[in-house]
Amino acid sequence: MTEKTAGGEVRLSGIGKTYGSFTAVHPLDLTVPQGSFFALLGASGCGKTTTLRMIAGLEDPTTGSVFLGDRDVTGLPPHKRPVNTVFQSYALFPHLDIYENVAFGLRRRGIKSVKKQVGDMLDLVQLGDFAQRKPHQLSGGQQQRVAVARALINHPQVLLLDEPLGALDLKLRRQMQLELKRIQTEVGITFVHVTHDQEEAMTMADTVAVMNGGRVEQLGAPAELYENPQTTFVANFLGTSNLIEAEVASNTGGEVVVTAADAKLRLPAQRCATAPTAGGKLLVGVRPEKISLAHADDAGSIADGRNRFTGTIADSSFIGVSTQYVIDSPVCPELEVYAQNIERDPRLVPGARVVLHWNPEHTFGLDAGQDIDAGVETVEATP
């Protein structure tokens, strides 16, 4: 087992793919550490699946090389690479029971004694009691776990997952996210997971590469990407961001002060993805859940030192755990605020004048030369 799982690091060196004049993946360098859960996240057509297929050997790269550990596997066909792939369509054999579906890879390699390995693998995916059932007798989530077990029984160095939860309903998908993370932690194999679902990537992965237009926009831990986006695409695609067009008043090296309409806002210099200069432009970002709302009558009770400006509630939506507000203000039109439903203020209704306020430390700055709406309208095409 140790020998087979060693060298599970995936290294892409200058790998790229073109189809005629269309570039699906611009040459990129990427390292997936051994034993990590790595997600390639992006909208339809961003190059994430093409990248995964090049690792699997299902697509030949136009440029660059694929390494597994220290071994260059670029020229190897898929069946000679120590990787297995789990697809959105589980591709189980309908005429075989679950036991034989999982045993298939071992039997194909001529291994006669499979009972212990199959039993262990079914226990890992918590389907030991379902061994004699046929695939059509299982739920979608159970079938997905069979597909994972069938791939893992071959002890691949790397397991590739191509939108594996896309066919499941929301509740089952969330359950399977935790299942996959548990399985990956138990077996310690490198998982590379392709998804367009931001929540899925952030729930499961240690590291996320956000892809856009065949390039990696930003790479990092989920919390780092969310809290410190470096581009407008990442800020908008990962969750929701309020981006405010502002002018830089001063930059002391520790703190940046900007003006937007009649508001003066502050943010830490280290949270700026660009070097702001006085008189220059900056996109100032703040996540909707970081902002607090106070009715205009209570403006005097807001603590000093917070970023603040006034606006009018244009719309509100009650969604159970929170209420989502849309605020109109000269500072930023259609600004979004998410307020947890703990103690709801009945005065916060459409038409009410409010003060928005938040901790300056929760503010980030982006290069104002970018498209402010990049990543906003990105919707995944139906498979």
Image (cartoon, grey):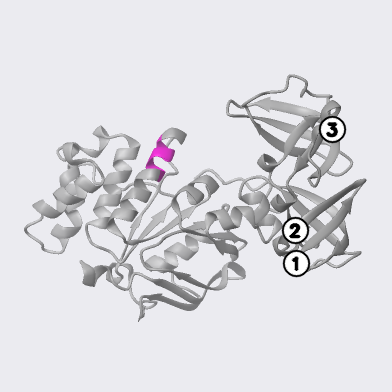
Q: Secondary structure at mark 1?
A: loop
Of labels 1 and 2, earlier in sequence is 1
Task: Please give the residue where the numbered disc 1 appears in the rendered image.
Answer: 274
Q: Main secondary structure of the magenta part?
A: helix
Gap in angstroms between the C-alphas marked 1 and 2 = 7 Å
- Cβ–Cβ below 8 Å for labels 1 and 2? yes
Tag in front: 1 or 3? 3
Q: Quadrant of residue 306?
A: top right
Spatial CA distance of label 1 from label 3 is: 33 Å
Left or right, 171 with reference to 115: right
- Image position, residue 107 (x, y; %): 13, 58
- Note whether residue 10 is visible: yes
Q: CA distance from mark 3 to mark 2?
A: 26 Å
Upstream in sequence: badge 3 or badge 2? 3
* Quarter of the image with the N terminus in it: bottom left
Q: Measuring 47% from the left and 48% from the top, which residue is drawn there?
A: 203
Residue 152, quarter of picture: bottom left
